[in-house]
Image (tube, coloured by chain):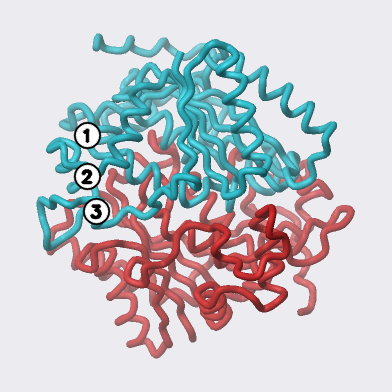
Chain colours: A cyan, B red
Amino acid sequence: MNVFLIHAHPEPKSLNGSLKDLAVETLTGLGHAVQVSDLYAMNWKAVADADDFPNRAHPDHLNYAYESKHAFLGGTQRDDIAAEQAKLLWADAVILQFPLWWYSMPAIMKGWFERVYAYGFAYGVGEHAGERYGDRFGEGNLLGRRALVSMTVGGRESHYTPRGVNGALDDVLWPIQHGMLFYPGMAVLEPFVVYQANRITPEQWADIADRYRARLRGLFTDAPIPFRRQNGGHYDGRQVLKDGLGGGETGTRIHLVQPGDPPEYPLPPR
Amino acid sequence: MNVFLIHAHPEPKSLNGSLKDLAVETLTGLGHAVQVSDLYAMNWKAVADADDFPNRAHPDHLNYAYESKHAFLGGTQRDDIAAEQAKLLWADAVILQFPLWWYSMPAIMKGWFERVYAYGFAYGVGEHAGERYGDRFGEGNLLGRRALVSMTVGGRESHYTPRGVNGALDDVLWPIQHGMLFYPGMAVLEPFVVYQANRITPEQWADIADRYRARLRGLFTDAPIPFRRQNGGHYDGRQVLKDGLGGGETGTRIHLVQPGDPPEYPLPPR
């Protein structure tokens, strides 16, 4: 299988760098093909701006989404953007490796999503009319791929438990896992997390590496997070969860399929 | 009073640009002093990297947090970073103006937080020992300031309701409002949001402007979101919410003070 690893850390000798190297070694050893986009090493352009569109539809007023659609459909995207899209389409699984900075991914990786996720490629896909609001959240051009967040965290694990002061880990990662990965159709696995990442001893690293290798071995077999598909029948025409679903939960967890829920509609043929 | 507006949109003639201009005009008219950091216009350096530290403590291994502490305490920060910190300290209120891109702020603004929020300035503040995990979440160097997120959203309002497919608005904004604004001590107001921002008619703009002016008039009087303070007595020594609190809620809403909760400890004298 093909694995695309997107890596964002400025120090190659960091824990993130070690996890990236371990993933490449482990996955290659398992017989997979691996491509890595090391965003800092590539000097990735982080800011979505007018320079992304040498051939503007509207030179006098920049609407980034509109220009990204124009460039994507017209084949005038910048090479750096098109190359990353090709890697996503090549991949059977996508891994994000990053340190959690201010409860989100580093800016350089956020800018990767803003620029690579063009209108027509990652959003604005499918019919938008009446009760239909596109092919997204479980459908889209990246359907059939798996996604894994592998990250390091400075704080303690207790801070990210369901009652921890930072918010539950799945709430902190909601914009990323649901909003960026599930949105264009990827099946998202439980994240791999190393807490208190600034205090890792050699003994702890051996344990971390063992845990991560196990997760990498399960990349194509572990059960994904059961996010509800937008067009799976659980949401109404305003994309609001139907009455009777999500009982017993509030917050983001209402958007997980729960035991006893009616089965989702099958995916349409592609 | 002093208001610091941080603006992130690449097109001055955009709806975000209009909201920024309206805020400056309205706040100035109310007698406030206003400073604006227009990140795109400033060509703000979005990526946190080694170039931020001309005077490295450890030239051979970049730990961004450690070097930011070294630069902050040693007075060797880059001028662009120190200037933004000075604006934060000058301000009585901070407004973030941005389009919601992929369920978060634009990369250029995320990079502003990564670079300006130095160790010792915005985190790593206060005692970290035993059950004490710093002055954060309601305490810190930005205590006494108010914060307001003003943002535009492409999708429909129903998508961001408590049962909407994108997740509730307060969950989507949790990493920003709780994790970036409340963290160093600011009191966070309810966000000001314009939905379906790509379809605004002149009549709608008049209404939006009226609504925003009303929010700006309330900048120093509206009640903030009642996030619990980390050191207010509601969390235990692992920074986990104590038993008996948060009843009836799950997810991020357990971290709001609720009627009937015991009063929080008073803030320590400064």
Tell me, yes or no, if residue B34 can be seen here: yes
Chain for disc number 1 = A
Q: Is residue A66 left or right of residue A30?
A: left
Q: How far apart are labels 3 and 1 at the CA level? A: 19 Å
Q: Are marks 2 and 1 in contact (CB under 8 Å)?
A: yes
In the rendered image, residue A220, in percent from the top left (x then y), is placed at: 52, 13
Label 2 or label 1, whichever comes before in sequence order: 2
Rendered residue at 55%/32% (across/down): A149
Question: Where does the image place residue A144, in percent across and percent down from the top left?
Answer: 38, 16
Residue located 67% across and 24% down the image: A212
Q: Are the numbered discs 3 and 2 placed on the same chain, yes or no? A: no
Q: Residue furthest bottom?
A: B31
| Residue that mark 2 sits on | A68
- Secondary structure of the residue carrying numbered label 3: helix
Q: Specify the amino acid type for callout 1.
A: Gly
Q: Which residue is mark 1?
A: A120
Q: How many C-alpha atoms fall within 10 Å of the one at disc 3: few (<14), some, or many (≥20)?
A: some
Q: Which residue is mark 3?
A: B197
| Residue extending farthest front | B60
Q: CA distance from mark 3 to mark 2?
A: 17 Å
Describe residue B98's horizontal placement relative to residue B50 as left or right.
left
- In the image, B18 versus B59, the foreground residue is B59
